[in-house]
Amino acid sequence: MNSKNIFKVAIRSILKSRMRGLLTTLGIIIGVASVIIMVAIGQGAQENITQQISALGSNLIIIYPGTTASGGVNKGAGSFNRFTLEDVEKIRKKAVYIKGITPIVRTSSQVIGPGGNWNTSIEGVSTDFQEVRNWKLKSGAFFSDRDLLSRSKVAVIGTDIVTNLFPSQEPVGKYIRIRNVPFKIIGVLESKGQSTMGPSNDDIIIAPSTTVLDRLVGGRYINLIQASAKSVELIDSAQVELRLIMRDSHRLNETEDDDFSIRNQTQITETFSETARTLTLLLGSVAGVSLLVGGIGIMNIMLVSVTERTREIGLRLSVGARSSDILIQFLVESILLSLSGGIIGILIAFGVSFVLNTYNIMTMIITPFVVIISFFFSAAVGVFFGFYPARKAAALNPIDALRYE
Amino acid sequence: MDMVIETRNLCKTYKIGEVEIKALRGVNFSIDKGEFVAVMGSSGSGKSTLMNLLGCLDKPSSGDFFLDGINTNGLSKNEYAAIRNQKIGFVFQGFNLLPRTTALENVELPLLYDRQKKHANSAQKARNALCRVSLQDRFEHLPGQLSGGQQQRVAIARALVNDPALILADEPTGNLDSYTSMEVFSLFQQLNDEGITIVLVTHERDFARYAKRVIELKDGRIIRDALIQNRLYAKEDLKLFKQSEIITPI
């Protein structure tokens, strides 16, 4: 039989039982669609994380208080030799690869404004904050070095704070009270949106680090230091430089380990991307199992079909079909079933991702790679699971097949 | 005259477990072109086995079988398939038409497996075959829309479409009433008059008399091979049948 006739016969016999064909392919449709959707969700998440991290700042380097172990007892992060503003000053004076540096003093508190009260986090920073975090103002101004020196009670607030404390008025120039200390609002930050890893980026109050240390936290320790390198290429050099300065500042001799850790944005991105990749792989393989189950469904139906069409096979053999003709016919049928399921699945996945992306429910990225892979995988499922029934059909003896009731 | 079939000491033994069943024990006969032979015998006589061998659906245990001058001994499975395709037209008791497939496509079926591509226009060829069995107005009908007699005529057209050397009909009227059976035999006789060789398997002596020659089997051997005396003509019987219906209404 020529190839045209093979396809004609296969398509016709599928069309003869449309409902069955559709139900059979349903497994493949769901399998392919879910593989593509799952992988697209994973890759969307990865993309989101990358964006969020680069939103943190430009060429960002973060110095965390490290862990120390004394006598085998690990005391956990930040347990020893915490950072002070002096560390920050030393870096500012000595480092040459650094464009800006800011301490971060974190606390959270109930905040009272004219429109109500709200629990939020407060970060005490230096004037380099805007530079380091690449964060522009929507209105007003940022505080100055003078504010920092004089421990001014001024604050710059995120848009979420505006929504909650100043629902119907312009916040700049107004006062809020944090732990009974009145702060004057001098600026509003631009919105950075939801962070994938935690709360909203905009749910924040920024104030001079000195003020936060003196008035709100008490003490002299800061939580971490953020710096930005002069360029992407200088991130590694800046990191080395920061390490040396910090070791010097903490008076560590050569035998002692670092009591801090330094990580840059790329490393953080990689860590989260790695997680996202694992997630993608996990989701993809779970969906892949459903594709496999779909393939077994095809095999099942093809086996039923072979039994049901035993007489037809006998007839075809008696009018001159070779065993190979029968084999190919059933194989083509199962491949067509699984391929059409694959194509429908791909279309469904595109539809779902279009809807979710359009309505901003979820970021989904469909790469051509995963589409091509799942297309060929569905074809392979057809070959693999169609082969056994097809071989069974081809092995039939024409005499027995013709007599089959 | 050309010989279409020649068998030399044809034997077939089935093995079911330990038991050997000798279905054919040395069968010798030949059939010339243009003959109409009825193979008769009770069940277990070996006529189905002979039919399977003549149809190249099965291989003999020993002996030779020549079909249209070709010795089928030692041919491969695929060569058997090719012989079935080129030389033989089957007509079965149960019609064996593909369901939900039009008459025309059913008739076209053997041409799909024709590897030599003798026929450029298979659809035209199928239409001609359907015309030969007077179904020129039923091309697009599905088997379910046809009567039993019409379905069997489609099956006969399918057997004719490849211009076979031989038509093998296995109880072709077993599923039909006697009137329709006569119609089918009238068609067979007409085709035989046109020169087509027909081998018919039947167990009804009345139907065997429509053939020209009868071969009777018993226990795997030929016990009678004779020309039919007072041959019957289905067309005349049909006329009589119609008249008798008019005279004696039920």
Image (cartoon, rainbow, N blue to C red):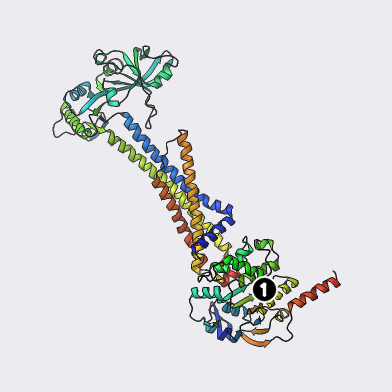
Point out residue B247 in the picture as x, y percentages from the top left corner. 86, 72
Q: Residue at x 24, y 24 (%)?
A: A101
Q: Position of residue A267 (x, y in %)?
A: 28, 36
Q: Is residue A116 left or right of residue A206?
A: right
The quadrant where residue B106 appears: bottom right
Name the residue nearer the viewer: B110 or A89.
Answer: B110
Amino acid on which the number 1 mark rests in the picture: Pro
**For the point 36% across and 42% down, which residue is it?**
A277
In the rendered image, the vertical position of residue A131 relative to residue B142, given as above or below: above
Q: Is residue A81 visible?
A: no
Q: Quadrant of residue A239?
A: top left
* Left or right: B22 as drawn, with respect to A224: right
Q: Position of residue B168 (x, y in %)?
A: 62, 76
Residue depicted at x 56% and y 60%: A305
Instruction: State the SS at label 1.
Output: loop
Q: Residues within 10 Å of mark 1 (few under 14, many from 20)?
A: many
Tell me residue B20's x, y (percent).
55, 81
- The residue indicated by pointer 1 is B172
- Seen in the picture, residue A144 relative to A99 is either above or below; the reply is above
